[in-house]
Image: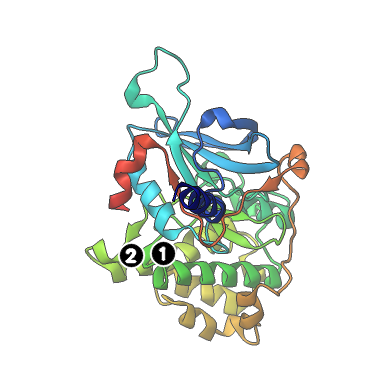
Amino acid sequence: MKIFLHVFIILFLLILKPLIAIDPINYNQLQEVGLLGYGLSPIAVKGVNLYEIKDTNKVVAVKELYKERNWKNEVRGLYNIGKAPYTVGLIAVIEGKVASESQQERNAPVWLLMEPYLGGTLGDAVGHFTGRKFESDYESVLVIDYKNLPSLKNIDVVKFYIANLGLILDYIHNEAKWVWRDVKPANILLDSKTGYLVGVDFGISEKLSEASDPKKLIIEDWQQLGKRVLREGFRINKEMADFNEHPNDLKDLVDQLSAGQIVSLDDLKKHSFFNKFDWESMKNRTLIAPYLPPCRLIQCGNFEPYRKSNDEKVYFSDEYKEIVKAL
């Protein structure tokens, strides 16, 4: 009987092992490789760093949050929305390393381990094509001659990125049943291996079934695609000196998105700007991306980004297991 039990346990562990690839994990198993991004609010977010899982060549992105912010909503959003190839996947939630012994418990960081995408942001891609990046919503305040900054004029590039984002929004709204609520270039990453876009940062996301007006929130996501990505990120707006150089159907697309007249992927596909566009290849990811970004960190050529398997479960360290039921 004991022999049978031992054999059963060994077989069980062999089967279970692929499902717990990095379970359990804590910060002692992580070695910092480099910085991926800063938090806009030092009170809420410490930053996003790239860490190697020791004794492997795998790297993960680690977002460090302070406990005093509403970090649980971000975990909840990532847990429910994160899915390749549309959005960044959540790998684990662990207790982060406290910066000093004097640091208060309420400020102790929470570490969100996520799939890393090392091709920079959509703002970096815009910079590649225009010669200048759009790094924040406040650039117009910082740049004196904002109106004369170059806009993104390559129509094929605009089509690819807007179609890619349309598929991401369609997944979030119709498959995940959530709303993003923070669609902007800084929250859109590039996969350095494919050039395709990936959504990230769901700190203010909301579950549709819990929203007081879900239809309104869906419309606002699509409006942000027009206002914050096309008008501000790609600089296709009437304030820009080169606005009249854009084709009329693109200007009309920007106006319709911004006004909330395009509110679904079907609406987007029907617009004249996308006439003869190969949506099937876009969905199957066989359409070649217009830009294959370099890896943001010199060392990352030595590492392999961690990617979750379809049946791999998100790991929660003991400190955070109580929130699982609320996800």
Please, which residue is most extreme toward the left here?
212
- Residue sitting at x 68%, y 39%: 56
- Residue sitting at x 65%, y 59%: 151
Label tally:
2
Q: Amino acid at mark 2?
A: Leu
Give residue 217's mark: 2
Seen from the viewer's position, the closer of residues 104 and 179 is 104
Residue 262 appears in which quarter of the rendering?
A: bottom left
Residue 320 % position (x, y): 35, 39
Whether residue 25 is situated above or below residue 285 in the rendered picture: above
Disc 2 residue crowd, few under 14, some 14–19, many 20+, Cα 10 Å:
many
- Residue sitting at x 66%, y 79%: 281
Please, which residue is most extreme toward the top here?
102
Residue 211 % position (x, y): 25, 62
Q: Is residue 197 left or right of residue 176?
A: right
Q: Amino acid at mark 1?
A: Asp
Q: Is residue 40 left or right of residue 58?
A: left
Residue 307 visible in the snapshot: yes
**Colouring chosen for the image of the structure:** rainbow
Residue 302 appears in which quarter of the rendering?
A: top right
Q: Are marks 2 and 1 in contact (CB under 8 Å)?
A: yes
Q: Which residue is mark 1?
A: 221
- Residue sitting at x 54%, y 39%: 62
Disc 1 residue crowd, few under 14, some 14–19, many 20+, Cα 10 Å:
many
Residue 116 % position (x, y): 60, 48
Residue 239 visible in the snapshot: no
Indicate the secondary structure of the residue bearing disc 1. helix
Residue 210 % position (x, y): 25, 62
Spatial separation of the CA atoms under disc 2 and disc 1? 6 Å
